[in-house]
Image: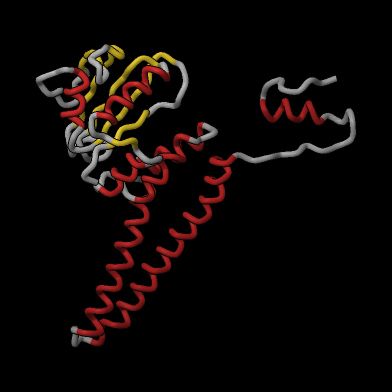
Amino acid sequence: MSDTIVAPATPPGYGGISIVRISGNLSTRLTKQICKRRSSFSHRRPTLSSVYNSDGKIIDNAVFTFFENPHSYTGEDVLEISCHGNPIVVDQIVSTICSSGARLADPGEFTKRAFLNGKMDLVQAESVSKLIESRSIEAANINNKILSGSLSKKLNTIKESIVGVLAELEFEFDISENESLIPNLITKSHKVINNNILACENLIDSYASGLLFNRGARVVIYGNPNVGKSTLLNALLEKDRAITS
């Protein structure tokens, strides 16, 4: 990961603001180059500056925010350019940065670098796209908790507990000479393992509801004409969505 990558961080289209993100060792140098700026940007301090193309013409006036490694999303030097939300402006900025030495990032590569640099684990990395694609408040809340590390903490607790039991058993069977302690240890180990099995079963049970929140559900209200299907739908939604006769 010695190269520097760049990509729009916001969806394509027209709007008030678009964000272009750069990550890698060359972030500072490339940004100073396209801004014709001698001094570096300060860590986490937004700075207004013009953006120039390779011909020296102004592309846009934008706000630059620098995140110095390792205190950034990817764990590398990261610079975010908040420009006007016009695809033409965004494309020109990205093209200018690429022509200066960066390359266009692959889909999900910023999150991949965050994972490889230890900024998040695999569970958290997978929750990033889930949070972005959430279809309900409940789904967004669930994925935000996972991204914050709640599921990882539960899994690590289970892992550490099992490893602890294994270490105690190996010590008693291989090293300890006090065999009278082994029955008590086996009883204790059974209890710990059963508790972990229960914890795993609870996580498995929560997967179904989490999947429903994330994907949504297709529901058919079936019945004869004029029996109250539309009334039932409006009651379930708590608003008048269907016309009732």
User: Residue at point 79% right, 20% down?
Assistant: 243
x and y, in percent, of residue 208 in the image: 56, 50
x and y, in percent, of residue 177 in the image: 18, 87
x and y, in percent, of residue 7 in the image: 35, 31
The part of the image, by quadrant, that contains residue 69 is top left
Furthest residue toward front = 55
Q: Between residues 18 and 245, which one lies in front from this camera angle?
A: 18
**214 in relation to 99, above or below:** below
Q: Between residues 239 and 144, which one lies in front from this camera angle?
A: 144
The part of the image, by quadrant, that contains residue 26 is top left
User: Residue at point 30% right, 13% down?
Assistant: 60
Q: Quadrant of the C terminus?
A: top right
**38 in relation to 172, above or below:** above
85 relative position to 31: left or right: right
Q: Between residues 35 and 240, which one lies in front from this camera angle?
A: 35
**34 in relation to 184, above or below:** above
224 relative position to 134: left or right: right
x and y, in percent, of residue 16 in the image: 40, 13
User: Residue at point 37% right, 17% down?
Assistant: 89
231 relative position to 87: left or right: right
User: Residue at point 34% right, 21% down?
Assistant: 92
